[in-house]
Image (tube, rainbow, N blue to C red):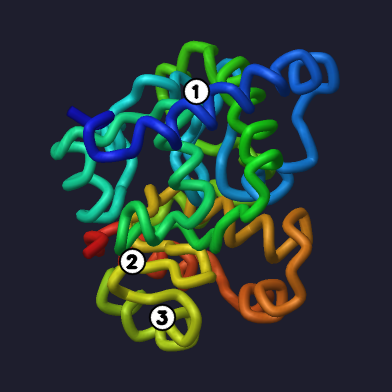
Amino acid sequence: MARSRWSRGLAAAALAAAAVFVPQARAGGAPPQFKACKACHKVGEGAVHGIGPHLDGLMGRRAGGLPDFAYSSSMVAHGRDGLVWTPETLDAYLAKPDALVPGTRMSYRGMRDPADRAALIAWLADATSAEPAEDATVAPEVSPGMYQGALALAGDPAYGEYLASECVTCHQVSGRADGIPSIVGWPREAFVQAIFAYKTNIRAHEVMRMVTTTLGDEEIASLAAYFEGLAPQ
């Protein structure tokens, strides 16, 4: 059903190009094209969710099909309509994500070069074959000792909504990306860890470091509770 929605010419071209790049991708590890993906997506045995869903078991997976990740309603709908991740559908999605899945939360604007897409897809076909982690909702990015105090607090969503006025100048409450990653529907622990990663400069981003530096445990817990409770539109 999914194949019928994309041209056979596109499918053949993507598969042929991917075959050319498989040896290079496997021999050299992650290709440079994955640099644009790795800030949001984790790959490899035991990979977990981050800003985006983990990619283990990607090929043949229904779009929006992981039950423990908050996808946009558009991605879920496309999956229900038959969109499955294959070399040809990934080629179309990577070329222009919002064209294939309007309303996607992915902030990436697209990879224009077909050869670059083929190299990335060939590597992903091999690298994402690992079994997903049993618990993919926790992203171990910073030392637990840094964030356990904030994580132990329930957090007040109403207070988080009040504090979020600065966040939503960039991150849309609807969950749409439009060039800036969505934080709507994030699991609490992943959200809290990300805040501490910016606070301690593990994630180097000057604006985020300035925004997060003054946040205490109560504020972080409340922001996490607020954004986790929002549903992507």
Residue placed at 22% from the left, 32% from the top? 4
Indicate the amino acid at tag 1.
Asp
Q: Judge whether 20 appears above or below 66 on screen.
A: above
Q: Quadrant of residue 64?
A: top left
Query: Tag 1, which secondary structure?
Result: loop
In front here: 38 or 186? 38
Query: Tag 2, which secondary structure?
Result: loop
Query: In this rendering, would 182 be left or right of 143?
Result: left
Compare marks 1 and 3 and give the one earlier in the sequence: 1
Indicate the amino acid at tag 3.
Ala
Q: Which residue is mark 1?
A: 56
Q: Which residue is mark 3?
A: 164
Residue placed at 63% from the left, 27% from the top? 17
Query: Tag 3, which secondary structure?
Result: loop
Locate residue 107, reporting x and y percent.
50, 62
Q: Quadrant of residue 194?
A: bottom right
